[in-house]
Image (cartoon, helix red, strand yellow):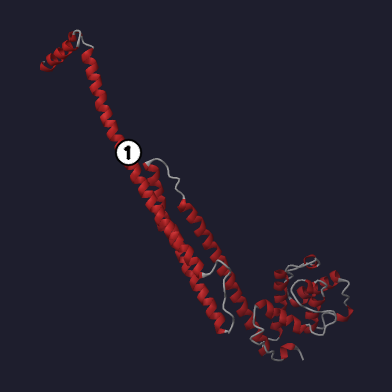
Amino acid sequence: KQWYQRRVAITAGEKKSAKEALLLWTQRRTKGYRNVNIRNFTTSWKDGLAFSALIHKHRPDLINFNELDRDEPKKNLTKAFDVAEKQLGIPRLLDVEDIDVDVPDEKSVMTYVANYYHAFAKMKTGDVGSKRIIKIISFLQECENMQEEYNRLASSLLEWIEQTIDTLASRDFPNMISGVQGLLAEFATYRLQEKPPKYAEKGNLEVLFYNLNAKLRSQSQPCFIPEDGKLLSDIARRWSELEAAEHAREVALREELMRLERLERMAEKFDKKAGMRATWLIENHKLVSQDSFGVGVAAVEAAKKEKSTD
């Protein structure tokens, strides 16, 4: 009367997540075992009895469950882990010290228990219920991985957008034409090289979102709703703000370049006039320093006329 020898009905309400599906499996497989009451993937496994019950349910020849004492958790854990590794080929992903704590790590325990599930499922590969559960857990795990990937990509893209907007908003421009021209060159590189891959990421994120929800709908599962601030509409809004910051940056740089160029032309014009004035002053200084000018304004004017007729 092994569980793998009968079909197990999994209702739509039970297909909520890989975690809940696996928890449901452990509860069904350990039902009726003394002092075993699995309610989570943390404290329910501390005394080692849950691991031992799973092993005994499928391979009663490997563990004498009735001899186990819940007051000896380290002994129970050591026994279960040794049997699982040596007799069932289940990788020893946990040590006794990992479980013998106030609250064991949930993901670590869940990952280790999943190995029990797969090991026992292989023992009855022809069972319909087993195959169905495997398919459900695999499907839900795939969906959870897609959700994690969406959140990771969305966080990364939003962080890049935030940092880029801050950079584009800066108006601390160098007071030289060459410096502003360098910033314009950097801006062009950003548009041609840095931005396009991020735009592609944005598109991939949208595809991932729609593919994920299509998979969930195909199994009558609730649609995936991203975390606050990571909705596609949030990303689209921030992208629009990025493009607005781009436009403002380009306008500011070109206006600053025009201002500096205008100042440079004014400076060149001033330098030219100053040079002409300096030449005039030098020539006149030479004239007034000659002895032939005599004394007085009239004499100087006469000398100048005489000089100009030479």
Q: Tell which of 134 and 61 is nearer to you.
A: 134
> Residue 271 at x, y = what percent?
29, 31
Amino acid tagged 1 = Glu
Residue named by callout 1: 264
Q: Is residue 2 left or right of residue 282?
A: right
Q: Callout 1: few (<14), some (14-19), or many (20+) C-alpha neighbours within 10 Å?
A: some
Q: Is residue 56 above or below residue 93?
A: below
> Residue 211 at x, y = what percent?
51, 77
Q: Tell which of 26 and 248 is nearer to you.
A: 248
Under circle 1, the secondary element is helix
- Which quarter of the figure has residue 108? bottom right
> Residue 48 at x, y = what percent?
82, 73
- Which quarter of the figure has residue 224? bottom right
Q: Quadrant of the N terminus?
A: bottom right
- Which quarter of the figure has residue 135? bottom right
Q: Is residue 213 above or below residue 296?
A: below
